[in-house]
Image: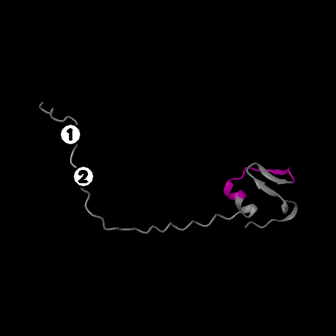
Amino acid sequence: MVKKKGWLAKAEARPTGYYVKGEKLKSAGLTQAECDAWNGVKAPAPKPAPVVEAVVEATAPIVEPAAKKFFKKKKKK
């Protein structure tokens, strides 16, 4: 964290300068990293990787039924 001294001690850093209660005290071009360091913002901790458990089940082989016949032979009278 950056040491805040003097008249900028209570200021909030934004990319366009330093502000107190919405009033611009000093104009400056700041990067997001500089704003974060001034305002005391910490990077979020990385999330742990999700644990994936493989489930293996024994299954019987799939047997497909025989194809149906749509057209039947005509019966003789």
Horizontally, residue 48 falls left or right of residue 40, namely left
Residue displayed at 25% across by 61% down = 61
Does residue 22 sit above or below 44 in this rendering?
above
Horizontally, residue 61 falls left or right of residue 12, namely left
Q: Dot 1: few (<14), some (14–19), or many (≥20) neighbours within 10 Å?
A: few
Q: Which residue is mark 1?
A: 69
Looking at this view, name the residue that lies furthest to the top.
77
Magenta includes 26? yes
SS of the residue under disc 2: loop
Is mark 2 in CB contact (under 8 Å) with mark 1? Answer: no
**What mark, if any, has residue 49 been given in the picture?**
none
Residue 44 on image: x %, y %: 63, 64
Horizontally, residue 71 falls left or right of residue 5, namely left
Separation of marks 2 and 1 at Cα, in angstroms:
15 Å
Residue displayed at 76% across by 50% down = 28
Quarter holding the N terminus?
bottom right
| Residue placed most toward the observer, 6 or 48 | 48
Q: Nearer the viewer, mark 2 or mark 1?
A: 1
Residue displayed at 83% across by 58% down = 11
Label count reads 2
Horizontally, residue 17 falls left or right of residue 56, namely right
Residue 39 falls in which quadrant of the image? Answer: bottom right
**What mark, if any, has residue 64 been given in the picture?**
2
SS of the residue under disc 1: loop
Q: How is the image coloured?
A: one colour
Q: Amino acid at mark 2?
A: Glu
Does residue 77 sit above or below 49 in this rendering?
above
Q: Which residues are magenta?
A: 21-35
